[in-house]
Amino acid sequence: MHMPLTKPNHFNADEQAADMLELGVCYYPEQWPRAKWEEDARRMVELGLAWVRIGEFAWAHIEPRPGEFHWEWMDEAIEVLGLAGLKVILGTPTAAPPKWLVDRHPDILPVDAKGVVRKFGARRHYCFSSRRYRVESARIVEAMAGRYGNNPFVHVWQTDNEYGDHDTIYSYSDEAQRAFREWLAARYGTVEELNRAWGTSFWAMHYNSFGEVDLPYNLVEEPSPTHLVDFMRFSSDQVVSFNKAQVDIIRRHAPGRPVTHNFMNQNTDFDHYKVGDDIDIASWDVYPMGGLINGRLSAEDKARYLRVGDPDQTAFHHDLYRAVGRGRVWVMEQQPGPVNWATHNQSPADGMVRLWTWLAYAHGVDMVSYFRWRQAPFAQEQFHAGLLLPNSAEDQGYLEVAQVAAEMKRLPKGELRGRAQVAIVLDYESRFATRALPQGRGYLASAIALDWYCAVSRLGVDVDFIGQHSDLNGYKLVLAPDLVIADPAFVTRLAASGAKAMFGPRSGSKTRDMHIPEGLPPGPLAELLDLCVTRVESLPDFHRETVLYGNTSHRAGAWRETVRTGEKVLATFEGDYRTGSPAMVGNDKARYLATLAQGDFLLKLIGDTLTWAGVETLPDLGDLRIARRGKLNFAFNYGSATASVPAASDATFLVGGRELDPVDVAIWTE
Ligand code: GAL
């Protein structure tokens, strides 16, 4: 059955965010014979797709030899797709510089932490600090934006592709070293100031000039943590300025057309808020199967969720990137089946592509684009599913997208994700800090934040993410699981806000210089809590502490602090070491947890804290997750048994029903 083709979808300057979920796909016309394009475009529209992303690895196809541009094929591809009724997202092709460019200018290449050059033959082989690459990046973006800035079919631009993919934020090249020295000179003004901040009196690491400072790699022992965190800050700033340079060019040629970048799962190698400030829509790439394999869960839980993924990791990132995009978030790449790049690549359960699509919409995502249209029978990603098999037959993902497209028609339009009552602070510099000074393998900030998020989600409560710059208006509770470098200005704003707060261990434990605060940790949090941390310890996996909370003993985690406090003691450590020492303290405004809690203990702590803050919770949802978007309520079943949806008795179900099968979705209004 062929649906009629829609009319071409010309860009118009008043274009607003869509009032219903839109779908799209990633397509590589350069990888397929010209003869397939029309048919592909027709089938995309027939499936219900509105968007198609192209171009992000096409540099060598556009400019196969220096200065020799071949636009014909791209002109034609854009036209074929646009005339079929699709809106094009055009990627700048800088994630894959051509071989001739690298051969001409080898200083473009990045250098790894062993000092070895990372060579041509895959992608992302460039160093953000290479001046030559900055020039070349501007040149190709200028050419592309000049040609397509006003193209009626190109509605959105994507810069580059996945900053940080394949560990490419940190480069140890000569160019990076030069730029790092300049960055340090700008930050510190005098080398004496750098010596003070880095604590170079320790081990006689003193520098006489900025020109003497090397990048922190291949050292005999670890570098000064300030050296390392400064290198991470510097590398982050390089990404921000690289991206901004492209955005500025695009805006000049394509005024009014939104710019996005596709961020990644679990990447905190650079400050995403800062890149987000320069673009219009934050998009990200959703690969929950690999995310599970590489993620925080125990082997037992990974086995349990093997084909559905971590029930919280994907939702966490939708919420995070909604903050990065200041409200506008898209999925640029949604896994449509098994992928190729994790250590193991299991298939998602049938139904998961549909579930992930609705999950995205529930969490505020306005467009979900699948990666990729057709599975490639050649090159690196042969094992990576597409919506179509290599022979163009429909694969499972295609069928599920068709189902979503049909279900969309049953939903009211214009529903928007509202502000949550609970905010979680994610601070990128704090992530740099714990990576520079881990102090124990059991302290993994990414896992800790996700554990806290999971506890809130299991109690049916929606979450927003915030940075220390964010507006706090309207929040009842701010959770800061790992805010190591607390900004005093943020703490003051928090103190003045209507929100209550709960902090995890290590909060406020380092200054911006990566020193222990003068008044001891938690540093600036002293404004909220009469509290002082006098000792920290990290503990091995084979040992767990016991914490008495209420009248129950709980096993607690890999981190323990000894605190002195004038506040109310809400939980205490038990056992043979410093028995009775406070494990959680608090007052009417703020609470501080001096250990890592997980599982049921964390669920209990977070549940009580939500209630304390006046946030209404549901009984533990187990493997069910719910989310709200406007008047729509969504439930997702990640478990292996049928579950009852916590809908009001007068609920009207638009998709699914009160009893939800595994891998199924319900959508209702009340
Ligand atoms: C992403 C990348 C895509 C593709 C995909 C495979 O990281 O942006 O180009 O490689 O992974 O899962």
Image (cartoon, grey):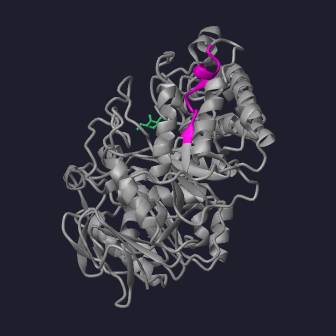
**Is 291 contained in the magenta span?**
no
Extreme bottom residue here?
Answer: 650
Return the x and y of residue 330 as percentages of the image width and height. 54, 54
Return the x and y of residue 381 as percentages of the image width and height. 37, 30
Q: Is residue 64 left or right of residue 595?
A: right
Give me the residue at 65% from left, 40% from top.
Answer: 197
Extreme right residue here?
Answer: 252
Return the x and y of residue 141 as percentages of the image width and height. 71, 30
Return the x and y of residue 30 as percentages of the image width and height. 52, 26
Where 563 falls versus 173 (above or below)? below
Give me the residue at 39% from left, 55% from top.
Answer: 402
Extreme top residue here?
Answer: 104
Give me the residue at 34% from left, 71% from top.
Answer: 458
- Residue 123 or 480: which is nearer the viewer? 123
**Is 56 contained in the magenta span?**
yes
Q: Quadrant of the C terminus?
A: bottom left
Residue 206's quadrant in the figure?
A: top right
- Residue 41 or 486: which is nearer the viewer? 41
Residue 64's quadrant in the figure?
A: top right
Residue 438's quadrant in the figure?
A: top left
Which range is magenta?
Answer: 53-64
